[in-house]
Image: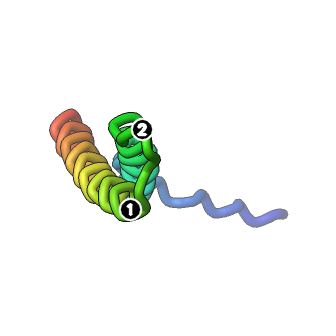
Amino acid sequence: MSTPTPQPDVVQAIVRRAPRFRAFLVTGLLVGAVVGLVVAVTTSDPGGVRGAVVLSLVGVGLLLGALVGAVLGVVLDARSARRRG
């Protein structure tokens, strides 16, 4: 006679799909840097772009992009938590 194989316990689990904040921040940083660079190049005087102007506008773009990415991540996280109810 063979012994009956034990049945595994069934465990209920809730899977919550939350956004990855690091991806939102990195994407915001990259988009902000590109936007800052484009603004610096397109609004420069005909004599050329100064390094300090480019650096400052890219820096502002980085900060604003990271802020927008973080806010978007928090909003999507709250929205996904609300859907779970």
Label 2 Cα crowd, 10 Å radius (few <14 / some 14-19 / many 20+):
few
Label located before the other in sequence (2 or 1): 2
Residue closer to the observer: 46 or 66:
46
Residue at 16% x, 38% y: name it: 82
Circle 2: residue type: Pro
Left or right of 81, for residue 40: right
- Residue at image coords 44%, 56%: 26
Which quadrant of the figure has residue 1?
bottom right
Amino acid carrying label 1: it is Leu
Residue 54: x and y in percent read: 39, 55
Report helix, strand or loop for mark 1. Answer: helix
Q: How many marks?
A: 2
* Mark carried by residue 27: none
Task: Identify the residue at the far front of this view.
Answer: 47
Nearer the observer, 72 or 30: 30
Question: Quarter-wise, where is residue 47 in the image?
Answer: top left
Asked whether, in this view, residue 24 is left or right of residue 9, the answer is left
**Quick one: label 1, few (<14), some, or many (20+) residues within 10 Å?**
some
Front residue (pair 17, 73): 73
Q: Which mark is residue 46?
A: 2
What is the spatial separation of the Cα atoms under label 2 and label 1, in whole angstroms? Answer: 18 Å
Q: Secondary structure at mark 2?
A: loop
In percent of width and height, residue 30 lies at: 45, 50
> Is 40 displayed left or right of 7 in the figure?
left
Q: Which residue is mark 1?
A: 55
Q: Quadrant of the C terminus?
A: top left
